[in-house]
Amino acid sequence: MPTHQPIFSIVLPVYNEARNIPTLLQRLTDTMNDLEPRYELIFVDDGSVDGSVDILMQYRADEPRIVVLKFSRNFGHHLALSAGLDHAKGEFVVMMDADLQDQPEEIPRLYEALKQGYDVVYGRRRHKKFSWWRRTTASSFRWLMKHWVGFPVPGGVFRIARRKVVDAVCSCRERHRMLVGLMSWVGFRQSAIEVEHGHRLAGESKYDFRRQWRLALDTLTAFSVRPLRLAWWTGLLFSISGLLSAVGVWAGWLFLNRHTPWWIALMCVGFFLGGVQLMAVGIVGEYLGRLFEEVQGRPLYILDDVERIDVYGDESMSSEEEKQ
Ligand code: UDP
Ligand code: MG
């Protein structure tokens, strides 16, 4: 059936990647022309200052399947990805980085895996080409998300998703977002394949410590209000230990006639009162957490499918309308 819509949309965030674009485009178009020529390449320029947009526009003159979205300034990797998803029209949407660390040649493999009956297939990066420090901090953070928060965030950005998943992700409009986490949150059938993680072709990683830290905080706070609860539990621990020590001091004085130094008694009171205060902060935190979740404004639920036969047909509708 002829269609004017693309089958594949490839979303690529670009922040000062001018030197990578020619090779990236060559490899992407080679791969996609073999796989399915009805595709679009959505480049989201995230406020580049190295002429990335000019290069993209030059290529666009000969290749109408290139779409260029230009941000007015740098908004960040995950907002660039979100803009790309918002504009993607394809039935299958691929997200990948523009520095060739995600290899275009892996797209057919992701698609093959998707066809096995999944809605999202993400790449689990083999032999990560990040520094030792980056790998350690990232894996510690993933561990924390999985075991403490109970919300694992699997895989990197490189992935393929069906339209219904993209629509669900696009319906979440929170500002501080970690797109991979959001795609995990919406559910559906997800799977992973191993992909090779390449070296960055040119330029430097934009994820310095500050950006990594910000992303980690965005992820933690977007999917959990647990840090707010910490105050409550710490407070409880402090006030119980304050109370128990006070009972010990009092029992020592009563039964053993042992006089405890004044500063120990003072510490008991301090522990107890400090604990009570922390618990009060924890209670405020509980309300704040709920408020935060409301403000995020995520959909209440996401339907994968609705099985329903309209047994009453249109007639019942008209009789309903008549009644009103
Ligand atoms: N990127 C972006 N905005 C930013 C930072 C990065 O659009 O503020 C893009 C960047 O051009 C690349 C992708 O996001 O295509 C991943 O960035 P990078 O390679 O620096 O991250 P790393 O591979 O080190 O995680
Ligand atoms: Mg990279």
Image (cartoon, rainbow, N blue to C red):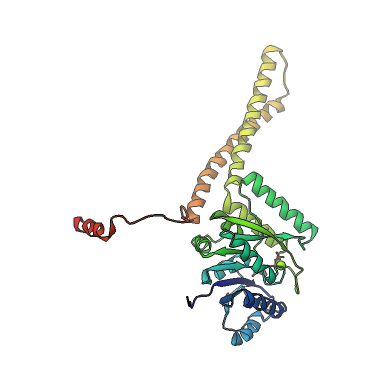
Q: Position of residue 254 (x, y in %)?
A: 66, 14
Seen at 61% across and 37% down, the residue is 233
Which of 73/297 is in front?
297
Name the image quarter holding the C terminus: bottom left
Quadrant position of residue 73: bottom right
Q: Position of residue 196 (x, y in %)?
A: 74, 64
Q: Position of residue 160 (x, y in %)?
A: 60, 64
Q: Is residue 68 above or below residue 206?
A: below
Horizontal relation, residue 196 to residue 187: left or right:
right
Seen at 62% across and 61% down, the residue is 113
Which of 11/247 is in front?
11
* Rendering quadrant holding ligand 2: bottom right
The answer to whether any part of residue 86 appears in the image is yes
Q: Position of residue 168 (x, y in %)?
A: 50, 60
Horizontal relation, residue 141 to residue 320: left or right:
right
Which of 285/91 is in front?
91
Q: How many marks?
A: 0
Outermost residue toward the left in this view? 322
Q: Is residue 213 above or below residue 238?
A: below
Which of 153/223 is in front?
153
The answer to whether any part of residue 96 appears in the image is no
Q: Is residue 122 above or below residue 58?
A: above
Quadrant position of residue 246: top right
